[in-house]
Image: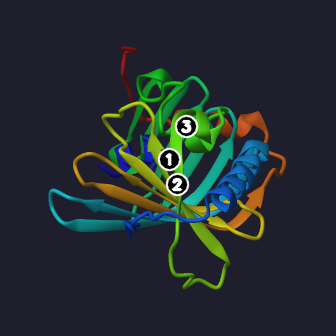
Amino acid sequence: MRRLLLVMMIAAFCGEARAGDAAADAAFIAKVEARFAETATLRARFEQKVFDAATGQTLASRGTVLLKKPRRMLWEYKEPETQTILADGKNLYLHTPADRQVTVQPLENLLTSRSPALFLAGGTPLRENFRITVVPRPNDSKIPQASLLLEPKEKSLTVTRIAIRVSTEDYSIISFTLNDWTGNRSEVVFTDMEVNGPVADKAFSFTRPKGTEVIEVPKY
């Protein structure tokens, strides 16, 4: 379930939106969108918490992430188990060393041009695919921040909403939470972020480790 939520884009934030200054909200959203649009690459550490509504359990994990628009992602999990999720723009690779398996499938099986999963690694403006609302919340962090709620304009079977927190200093995304229609949610928090640093395309090239079984999922 963690894999699905992360690929489809991947502690919950459930604040209630309320009306604010419309002009101020619009100006703030515009600044966030501008920062998002100019972010071509991202390198960071991440911590993820995934809540499984069926079991009531929360799984915590951490690792590093590398993103390059469009549609290139490398999530390397270090704890509690080693795992790699890589998107090279065409295919998605899921490698679990403990299982000695790698699953490969066309990225289009999971990500379409209007998929909420592309809000980080995609190339389209946020407001093109989402209704965006500023959500007031107590500022209990050392980092000045604000929250936005992104609701897909087109109904999605996987993601019902995305809550993001952004720095009010440089308007960059510092965390996001995905919620799906079954009640599952996945929160990812970034630290040690480097935005728009040099990232070579070869970083998103997958080489199958020897002795690893390859499971290919056909395009559908």
Residue at mark 3 to residue at mark 1: CA–CA distance: 18 Å
- Which quadrant would residue 151 be assigned to in this image? top left
The residue indicated by pointer 2 is 133
Q: Earlier in the sequence, mark 3 or mark 2?
A: 3
Q: Secondary structure at mark 1?
A: strand
Q: Nearer the viewer, mark 2 or mark 1?
A: 2
Closer-to-camera residue (114/46): 114
Q: Is residue 162 above or below residue 123?
A: below
Q: Residue furthest right?
A: 198
Viewer-side label of 3, 2? 2
Q: Nearer the viewer, residue 67 or 53?
A: 53
Q: Secondary structure beneath disc 2?
A: strand
Disc 3 crowd rating (10 Å Cα; few below 14, some 14-19, many 20+) is: many
On the question of residue 108 being in view, the answer is yes
- Give whichever of discs 3 and 1 has the lower sequence position: 1
Q: Which residue is mark 1?
A: 84
Quadrant of res 48: bottom left
The amino acid sitting under disc 1 is Thr
Q: Residue at x 79, y 39 (%)?
A: 200
Residue highlighted by disc 3: 118
How far is the residue under mark 3 from the one under mark 2? 19 Å
